[in-house]
Image: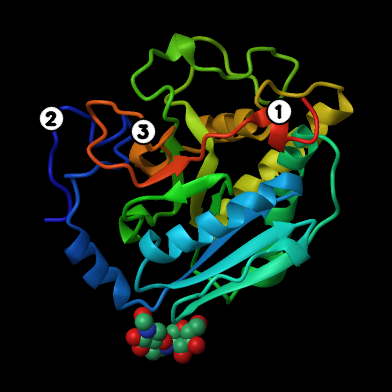
Amino acid sequence: LLFFIRTDVASVSPWSAPIIWEGNFDSTLIDSIYKQQNLTIATTVFALGKYTRFVKDFLESAEQHYFVGFRVHYYLFTDQPESVPEVKMGENRSLTVQNVPSLNRWQDISMSRMEKLENLIENELVNEADYIFCLDIDTKFYGRWGAETLGRLVGVIHPWFFDAPRSQFTYERRPESKAYIPVEEGDYYYAGAAFGGSLEDVHHLTKTCREQLNIDAANSIEAVWQEESHLNKYFLLNKPSKLLSPEYMWRDINEKAAQIKIVRFTNVPKNYAEVRPNP
Ligand SMILES: *[C@@H]1O[C@H](CO)[C@@H](O)[C@H](O)[C@H]1NC(C)=O
Ligand SMILES: *[C@@H]1O[C@H](CO)[C@@H](O)[C@H](O)[C@H]1NC(C)=O
């Protein structure tokens, strides 16, 4: 039996995709199945400007909790390769640092990500990786993130909206934007800070979002939450095959909620005014 039932949270989406919560999967069994496949998990992060300060904690905590016992290849995009700290990697784990130009607005940094990911998958990952996860760098692991998260197309339910009514979701509401979602539509509000899946599916996601972001830019409109708004539109039209509960992208290690039995991965609290290049 791979999945158990928890009664205080939904274990499947309306389209029958599993939703991964502590208590509804057997980690030992899942590991034994996936370990036979000799998988490589590509994992991307972006650390531009002052965000390089988050790299050390991200990598060190990932080495303790993230796909332990699997082959993981981190790809770190940064405009300051010289400031990437030395982090000891385990066996079958490696880090590639890719130099990218500095950008002056955090909104532009967010928007250029999709294009960088699309190119990485096309040019470097084919035949090199089986799955990819794209994660924010201002984060830290506190608990297991393992093979239970693998799937064709994987989204994470946003920690601020998992028990909120749809009317409160911060989707883009202007019909002029390609990210537009009408008030009567939408399944979940997904976090832009973590998504993943097979190379083919994530390539399609990044290509589509990049195209939609470009159309918006040509029309001089910027979606309310940039990339996250476009990701939400993408997941509305292309339903994820697996959803991760907010255990996999929590707000802060010190915050509690009755449904959250374990915090696996969190945002690191920060002063936005201090780390972003512009307001
Ligand atoms: C597992 O995959 C890696 C990288 O793709 C490869 O170098 C290695 O030979 C594979 N090992 C086995 C046992 O197939
Ligand atoms: C590294 O991968 C090889 C297969 O390519 C495997 O035999 C070995 O056990 C792995 N090492 C660890 C520490 O997972």
Is residue 63 shown to the viewer in this render?
Answer: yes
**Mark 2 surroundings within 10 Å by alpha-carbon count, few (fewer than 14), some (14 through 19), many (20 or more):** few
Query: In percent of the image, x 76 and y 44: which residue is there?
Result: 112
Ligand 2, seen in the image, is in the quarter at: bottom left
Kind of residue at badge 3: Asn
**Vertical relation: 190 (above or below) 147:** above
Q: Tell whether label 2 touches label 1 (CB within 8 Å).
A: no
Whole-percent x, y for residue 17 in the image = 32, 41
Front position among marks 1 and 2: 1
Of mark 3 and mark 2, the one earlier in the sequence is: 2
Disc 3 C-beta below 8 A from ligand 2: no
Kind of residue at badge 1: Ala
Q: What element carries label 2?
A: loop
Which of the numbered marks, if any, corresponds to residue 254?
3
Residue where numbered disc 2 is placed: 7
Whole-percent x, y for residue 258 in the image = 22, 26
Residue where numbered disc 1 is placed: 273
Of mark 1 and mark 2, the one earlier in the sequence is: 2
Q: In which quarter of the image is residue 259?
A: top left
Whole-percent x, y for residue 114 in the image = 70, 47
Q: In which quarter of the image is the N terminus?
A: bottom left
Q: Quadrant of the C terminus?
A: top right
Disc 1 C-beta below 8 A from ligand 2: no
